[in-house]
Amino acid sequence: MANEGKKEKRKIDKDLDRLEQFFEKRIGLGTSFDLGIRKLIVLKTNVHLYYVNGLTDSLYVIEIIKELVNLNDVEKPTKEIGKLIENRLVHDSVEVVKTSDEMVDQVLSGLLAVVVEGEGSAFIIDVRSYPGRQPEEPDTEKVVRGSRDGYVENIIVNTALTRRRIRDERLRFEIFTIGERSKTDIAIGYLSDVANPQLIETIKKEIKNIDIDGITMADKTVEEFIMKQGYNPYPLVRYTERADVGSIHLLEGHVLIYIDTSPSIMITPTTFFHHVQHAEEYRQSPAVGTFVRWTRFLGIWASLFILPLWFLFAQEPSMLPSALAFIGPNEQSEIPLIYQLLIADLGVEFLRIAAIHTPTPLSTAMGLIAAVLIGQIAIDVGLFNPEVILYISFAAIGTFSTPSYELSVANKMVRMVLLILVAFFKAPGLIIGSTIFILFLASLRPLNAPYLWPLLPFNPRAFSHIIVRRAVPGSVLRPSIVHPRDKYRQPPK
């Protein structure tokens, strides 16, 4: 570690030949085909330009080279050539660095380094042009009405999409570089007069404490370091690829985490109920939004409890009222119901995984074949009872109606555990399992925010906002869960 500290303080060599040798040894200049160097003589002084081909905009680089070469025709040799060149760098973002390690990091990040012989410093020019796609609507967060742009893999584009929606001078983006080898850019966004300062400092501290060689898996790696989730399946941060969703959470007082190379941004802190909301609810009238929300809540409840409840009634028909006596299998199968349910539930998960990894033109056809043919054949040969397929389908639809993919998978895992408990202990198994499940969620406090808020601890005003989609003019207060410095969204009347 002592050697690392010495390297960080190494000054940029004033002799450009030795500096070139340093780059050859340090980053493979001359070996890696994408690392470039352009050598110029400006007013009888050697000038070197270092860059990475695939990460820089060649047109900007050419314009800068033209300006430097033209100095030979319009200027006379001078001892202040460094200042003269700095004045001729036709770009809005120019920074001076003094150490070779800073210079290497900037070049590998896609910036252009201009070094003048005898100066002992480098001009860093932001000519980055990262490969990537244009902003487009996220596949997992589609809406009938609303904006069609979404976050992409470029952190600069993502912060710009946010600034386009919040043109407030108090919007802040603080950037960090994490990863000994990957050197990934991470930015946190917040409103300085709204967000809780303790929350901001906690997140900054956790990000700075990340010590790893690389975070090429981006947001998920950062989440595991910050939240220390372990094997808890439930999501502790909310992901979104929609710029409007990210912006509205900024206005509420949340802190957003942007990671370069990831199209998803993390919203912190979040509760269970943040994961069951969708932008579509706020693109419709309050009445329609409330109806959509209730329907979604019903689907999420079905994904968790409809299978365990049906299995319990199938085992204990006496628990059913006479009006519902038809519930339960009419025919006995050689395969126990619990095995049928678990196999069918895993089969739906197989289909979902297969659809993700199947090319789009084929995935629809594959889903139809699997759903119709495999399900019907399984019933005909006696592998599954028809009612098993029916209730598995209800549970699957509820799973797919859950807005958060992470939450839907976690709920499926809980559902399978409840099925096993019902198989062993019947009604007490379902009651005890459900109680432990709720207590587990209530015990979670991501970034010191109760996970089941505003249900536990109960906050009547906030809970009413969860149940009913309120009109924007009536939403005067920001959510208290984020402890905002300014609690009013609108001036109180």
Image (cartoon, grey):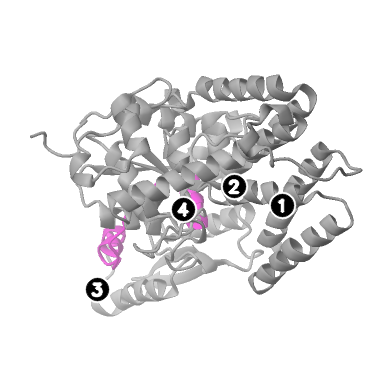
Badge 3 element: loop
In primary-sequence order, the first of circles 2 and 3 is 3
* Left or right, residue 59 beside residue 260: left
Would you say residue 86 sits in the magenta stretch?
A: yes
* Alpha-carbon span between mark 1 and mark 4: 47 Å
> At which x and y percent is residue 353?
70, 55
Q: How many marks?
A: 4
Tell me, yes or no, if residue 35 can be seen here: yes
Identify residue for label 4. 106
Q: Residues within 10 Å of mark 1 (few under 14, many from 20)?
A: some
* Alpha-carbon span between mark 2 and mark 4: 45 Å
Identify residue for label 3. 75
Question: Residue placed farthest to the left in the image?
Answer: 493
Specify the segment rendered in magenta. 79-108
* Alpha-carbon span between mark 1 and mark 3: 74 Å
Residue 176 in which image quadrant: top left
> At which x and y percent is residue 42?
36, 71
Q: Quadrant of the N terminus?
A: top right
Badge 4 element: helix
Label 1 vs label 3, nearer the camera: 1
Identify residue for label 2. 399
> At which x and y percent is residue 368?
70, 67
Q: Are marks 1 and 2 in contact (CB under 8 Å)?
A: yes
Would you say residue 344 sits in the magenta stretch?
A: no
Name the amino acid type tagged 1.
Answer: Val
- Mark sitting on residue 348: 1
Badge 1 element: helix
Q: Residue at x 86, y 42 (%)?
A: 332
> At which x and y percent is residue 264?
48, 51
Residue 158 in which image quadrant: bottom left
Q: Residue at x 29, y 49 (%)?
A: 286
